[in-house]
Amino acid sequence: MALNLLDYDGPGLTAYFAAMGEKAFRATQVQRWIHRFGQDDFDAMTDIAKSLREKLKADSYVQPPPIISDKLSDDGTRKFLMDVGNGNAIETVFIPEETRGTLCISSQAGCALDCAFCSTGKQGFNRNLTVAEIIGQLWQANRAMGFDPRGERIISNVVMMGMGEPLANFDNVVTALHLMLDDNAYGLSRRRVTVSTSGIVPAMDRLRDACPVALAVSLHAPTDALRDKLVPINQKYPLAELMAACQRYLVKAPRDFITFEYVMLEGVNDADAQARQLVELTKDVPCKFNLIPFNPFPKAPFGRSRADRVRSFADILMGAGIVTTTRKTRGDDIDAACGQLAGQVKDKSRRVARAEDGKTIPLVEVQQ
Ligand code: SAH
Ligand code: SF4
């Protein structure tokens, strides 16, 4: 069966070439063509012998997920919808800022974790993305944005904050991360690649050992009672275990802090007292906080905290010496903001059908 070369990192490609009786440096050359120069046509790889090009053409191909739509927001944010087959489509978002360009990548078609405030979670889960589908988002975005391998980097940062829980698709995500960091592929520094997790504790330890990139943890609540409802995976890995895993991660991480993401839900998790609880909870973890104004989606049972509430909450964290930023909402006119990514998911978890029966969606009590 022919192989999609986007599925392989450096060692994988080298092993494939070795099996064809080809030297390792040939694999590196081809890898550079594919990832650095965005090339999918073997005939255009001019420094590769014709005989090898013919072999590659017979046995393999380079195929990222095709772009179905490409939308530009008024603020420059750009959202790609990509086809991953069988009625599933995923979203990838490019966010330009003054000093950097960030690509937000998806790791799964849907998500099985069902956080109460997340549009992706509400869609249910279909499957893990392959390596080619994960790295193919970066490949496609580079190409669509006029990738110039010698000039300024248009995509300088990658965040695994799109659809899905990256640590629930561990092996494929780590292989894709290796490609992002590889100088013969995308050559991003570890600090410019961020994995965001809802807190799958054993996988955080594995990531630390396999590829300790920057880590963001979706916290969203200061107590187990509330987090159990907002982020149901908390029932399995409660806060004390999560905080301990954050400390263990930092032992090997190139960055000396964890970024805690905290979506601000009006009247649910945004009181001053809750900010003070967070200070106490995170006191042994070198960290920053990133407050995210809640982005609404159809039938969402939450409201966005008011700006003055967010400011007061941030002031308490900062008063305790924690660097705190409030994320600007970007791309919401094209539904590209955090938590709005929905793509198209053929739900296998039957969550959508059950929700329509009104049976199993956990309702979160809103404090007044
Ligand atoms: N599954 C991973 C990464 C994808 S979600 C995780 O949960 O961390 C990326 C970020 O968007 C998370 O911090 C998530 O909590 C946040 N998010 C989800 N829904 C949101 C919404 N409706 N408004 C604002 N942020 C949201
Ligand atoms: Fe999944 Fe993250 Fe959404 Fe939770 S917030 S449902 S883990 S994508």
Image (cartoon, rainbow, N blue to C red):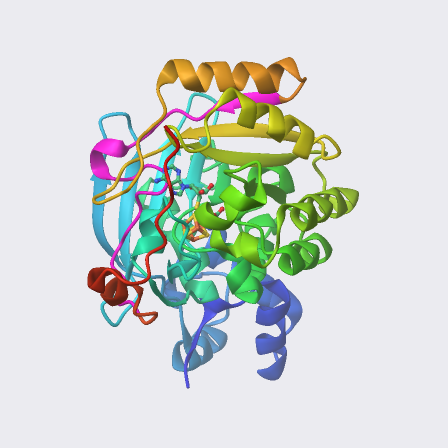
So how many labels did they put on this image? 0
Q: Nearer the viewer, residue 1 or 250?
A: 250
Q: Residue at x 73, y 46 (%)?
A: 244
Residue 97 seen anywhere in this rendered image of the structure: yes
Instruction: Name the side, left or right, on which 234 lies relative to 136.
Output: right
Which residue does the image show at 42% across and 76% down from the upper left? 60
Locate residue 174: give its quadrant: bottom right
The one nearer the camera, 12 or 41, is: 12
**What percent of the width, then of the height, locates residue 324?**
56, 22
Between residue 13 and residue 174, name the one nearer to us. 174
Q: Give residue 161's quadrant in the image.
A: top left
Q: Is residue 363 above or below residue 203?
A: above
Counting from the top left corner in percent of width and height, residue 57 is at 39, 76
The picture quadrant where one finds residue 340 is top left
> Which residue is at a point 48% across and 14% down the rendered structure image?
312
Residue 278 within the magenta-colored segment of the rendering: no
As drawn, is 149 to the left or to the right of 126?
right
- From this view, report whether residue 313 is shown above or below residue 9: above
Q: Is residue 23 above or below residue 74?
A: below
Q: Identify the residue at image location x=57%, y=36%.
A: 222
Q: Which residue sits furthest right?
A: 251
Magenta: main secondary structure = loop
Which image quarter is the N terminus in? bottom left
> In which quadrant of the rendered image does the C terminus lie?
top left
Q: Is residue 338 magenta?
A: yes
Q: Position of residue 122 (x, y in %)?
A: 31, 54
| Ligand 1 falls in quadrant | top left
Q: Is residue 195 visible?
A: no
> Which residues fall within the magenta stretch?
323-347
Across and down, in percent, residue 153 comes to: 47, 35
